[in-house]
Amino acid sequence: MPLAVVAMSGGLDSCVTAALALHAGEQLAALHVSYGQLTARREHQAFEAVCDALGIRLRHHASIAHLREFGGSALTDPTLALPLGEDPHRAGIPVSYVPQRNGNLLLIAAAWAEVLHAESIWTGMVEEDASGYPDCRRSFCDALERAIGEGNHDDHPDPRIVTPLIHLTKGQIVAQGLALGAPLELTWSCYQREDRACGVCDSCQLRLQGFAANGASDPLPYLER
């Protein structure tokens, strides 16, 4: 059975990605990376719960919390205000973008993949229906895949970066998760709260729209819908 490293934030997209990898016959090693985000504790809790539900035993929790010290993002700096209640599909790069987070994350995944001789790295990045983050583009993943291959051990396989959700809408992602029976109720998406999802940040709005597109109710507790 092929081995894959799957990057899992504890959110909906990475949960569906892990379920798709399992459905494809992959044996998974789950990587969770904390980057100093405001909801780090809650996301890690969701990661562990999703791994338990999917039967993923091999797990690693890494930290790049120095990104919080760098600042520049409302996800790590509480003095920067998140856009609440605005159209999450608006043009431009939002203040919730964390500079080079996904590059750091994928290189950590590549290091673990090299040690494990894993053939692929799975990530739930979404280009089509995301919030405009430049490091969620497939072209970014292609460039990193080539760089990882250049720096990889000569006797080990060069891992592919697999992005099964990259061109899907949130509605299509939720549909995939529901069809696979993925434990979406255990995931966490809110950018700013850890008790009840706020319902008005970009991530909450996209998630709610995804469930609504499927005529389904999001099982998470919300302050506002």
Image (cartoon, rainbow, N blue to C red):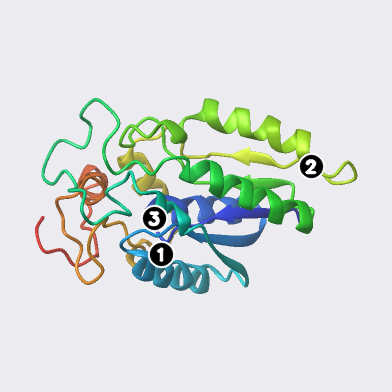
Label 3 element class? helix
Query: Do the numbered discs 1 and 3 sit on residues whose CB atoms are within 8 Å?
Result: no
The disc, 1 or 2, on the residue closer to the chain's N-terminal end is 2
Query: Which comes sooner in the sequence, label 1 or label 3?
Result: 3
Residue 35 at x, y percent in the picture:
44, 57
Question: Which dot, 2 or 3, sits closer to the camera?
Answer: 3
Identity, as a three-letter code, of the amino acid under mark 2: Asn
Q: Amino acid at mark 3?
A: Arg
Q: Estimate the spatial distance between the alpha carbons at disc 1 and disc 3, rounded to whole Å.
A: 29 Å
Select label 1 or label 2 by which is in front: 2
Q: Give 38 or 20, whichever is nearer the viewer.
A: 38
Classify residue 98 by image quadrant: top left
- Residue drawn at x 20%, y 57% as measured from the top left: 217
Q: Residue at x 63, y 52 (%)?
A: 109
Is the residue 11 above or below the residue 195 in the image? above
- Pick the residue in front: 81 or 135: 81
Task: Provide residue 219's location: percent of width, then percent of height.
Answer: 24, 64
Instruction: Name the residue carrying label 2.
Output: 152
Q: In the rendered view of the protein, which quadrant contains the N terminus?
A: bottom right
Badges 1 and 2: C-beta atoms under 8 Å apart?
Answer: no
Disc 2 element: loop
Q: Is residue 89 above or below residue 65?
A: above
| Amino acid type shown at disc 1 | Pro
- Residue at image position (54%, 49%) is 105
Q: Which residue is mark 1?
A: 183
The C terminus, quarter of image: bottom left
Q: Which residue is mark 3?
A: 68
- The picture places residue 97, in percent across and down from the top left corner, at 34, 41
203 and 57: which is toward the camera: 203
Give SS at disc 1.
loop
